[in-house]
Amino acid sequence: MKGEDAGLLYPRSCVPNYLIVPKIVMKVLASLAAKSIDALRLAALGIAVCLFASSCSIFISYEIVPASVEIRTAAIRYAQKYAELGAVYEWGGQDPLPRKIAVDCSGLVIRCYEYACGDYGASLLFKDTTAKGLRQYSSLIASPEKGDLIMIGDNNEISHVALFTRKEDGRLYFIDATSLTGMVSMRSYAENDPKFIEFRRMNVINKK
């Protein structure tokens, strides 16, 4: 997935606006950001941040957690929407719904999780990455559930990612964007297919 966000299906942002604060507070935040405060590290440690400006006090606490079943289910709904609208495969594509759509495998996953996060007040740990890069933002799991990530490739080298939907009759069904079909669609492989490298669950940032 390459490039910058060009819009969302809904006007609400994937990154929740937890607080509306005075301009003076925003200046303080900007000043702290300029000093390279690592917000993600704070989130990972679950540290509460306390900022004071004039008479206004802000307390913000974040935690990194595996995506809930609600978020994962919503991600699948958005993936199905991409398929219904006839989204085509394009390397580096990240087109948002509902315009003419072209996405690649990681672009589809990221977009769907961005939208799903926005529905439940969460956010992703990153803006853009590759199929292989998703490993650092997700947790290894033994058995996938709806909305989990399927890491696919050859010779144990990840080159593709898909969204798991279900297991049926010894096959794993998933939604992906691939050059093999030229579109976003539902596909399946035998559950013991060597192309399946591992299963992972997306991690998200929640406000505590």
Image (tube, rainbow, N blue to C red):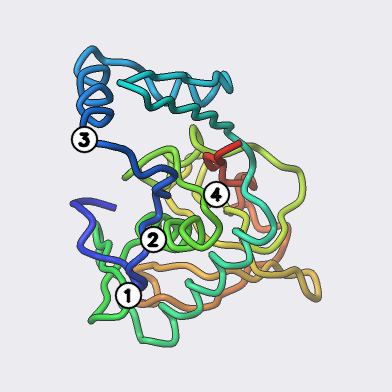
Callouts 1 and 2 close, C-beta under 8 Å: yes
Please give the residue where the numbered disc 1 appears in the rendered image.
97
Question: CB under 8 Å between callouts 3 and 2?
Answer: no
- Of helix, strand and loop, which one carries label 1? loop
Circle nearer the N terminus (4, 1):
1
First along the sequence among labels 3 and 1: 3
Mark sitting on residue 129: none
Q: Which element type, helix, strand or loop, lies under badge 2?
A: helix
How far apart are labels 4 and 2 at the CA level?
17 Å
Q: Is 137 located above or below residue 78 in the figure? A: above
- Work out whether mark 1 precedes mark 2 in sequence or the reverse, and give the earlier one: 1
Mark 2: which amino acid? Arg
Q: Amino acid at mark 4?
A: Met
The residue tagged 4 is 151
Q: Which residue is mark 3?
A: 23
Viewer-nearest of discs 3 and 2: 3
